[in-house]
Amino acid sequence: MLKHERVRAQLEELIHSNYRSGDCLPGERFLEQKFGVSRITVRRAISELVQAGLLVRVHGKGTFVSHGRVQSHLHLASFHEDIRNAGMTPGTKVIDAYWEEPPENLQKFFPQTQRLLHLKRLRLGNGLPVSVDQSWIPEDIAQPFVHSDLTSSLYELFSSSGTPVVGAQQTVEAGKPSEDLAHLLEISPREPVLIFHRYSYTLIDGIKFPIEHTVSTYRADRYRLSMHVESSSSTCSAH
């Protein structure tokens, strides 16, 4: 076993036996002395535990025992549902909300819309930042709930106003956050994030109608995707 692997195993055992979710890990100097290794070895072991989801780094504060990663199964569900399914308490802070003309990149998706509600929200799991969502919603869809509690699930607001989401197209890519998003997510701008682009639809008089475009930027150390893939079966017969 390599030295950093041994330290990782010892550190993992230490965490499970002495620490709880949210506890701050001792400093690197303490861990160097405890395990009798170099700081480079300690840092590598910690980095691997961060990648595994057991630890999380909070920029400027330290390294903490993780509350666990939120797992999504690539289904049509709200952030609140995913967080609750992970055994956490969801939370939302509204960062900004205002009306604007459709940006050029959204004019094809919202071809007949005069104004959009631009909603920017910080999403939390057990009080810790998980993602920043930026949503654009047509004015006629948003008007019934624009003065409601915008910290609640948008899917629930859509349903309560009679325009539930019936389908969506979503893509995911890796990226780096802007300075603003990194600050909200409490990470360094150099850290990787997962960026979701979602285009959602509702049915109005039996016609599919665009209802929402959302760009969600997730901390990669607090969110992961799960996919169920099946191979197509085939049968062969000899003649």
Image (cartoon, helix red, strand yellow):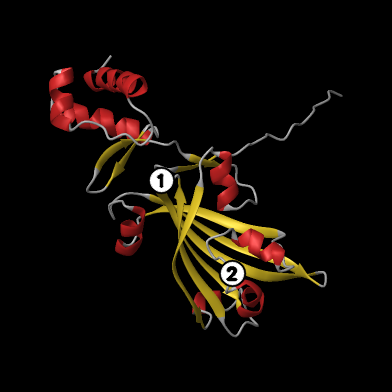
Please state the horizontal and vertical placement of residue 143, each as a whole percent of the image. Answer: 63, 77
Q: Nearer the viewer, residue 56 or 215?
A: 56
Please tell me which residue is depicted at 72% across the width and 67% down the height of the picture.
Answer: 163
Mark 2 neighbour density, 10 Å: few (under 14) some (14–19) many (20 or more): few
Q: Is residue 59 visible?
A: yes
Specify whether 84 is left or right of 140.
Answer: left
- Helix, strand or loop at label 1? It is loop
Q: CA distance from mark 1 to mark 2?
A: 31 Å
Specify whether 124 is left or right of 44.
Answer: right
> Which residue has dot 1 on it?
220
Please tell me which residue is depicted at 80% across the width and 27% down the height of the picture.
Answer: 236
Q: Quadrant of residue 35?
A: top left
Q: Nearer the viewer, residue 55 or 226?
A: 55
Specify whether 60 is left or right of 170.
Answer: left
Q: Quadrant of residue 183?
A: bottom left
Please tell me which residue is depicted at 28% across the width and 35% down the height of the picture.
Answer: 24
> Which residue has dot 2 on it?
148
Mark 1 neighbour density, 10 Å: few (under 14) some (14–19) many (20 or more): some
Please state the horizontal and vertical placement of residue 68, each as a whole percent of the image. Answer: 44, 36
Q: Is residue 218 visible?
A: no
Please state the horizontal and vertical placement of residue 203, each as a whole percent of the image. Answer: 76, 67
Specify whether 170 is left or right of 202.
Answer: left
- Helix, strand or loop at label 2? It is loop
Contact (CB < 8 A) between labels 1 and 2?
no
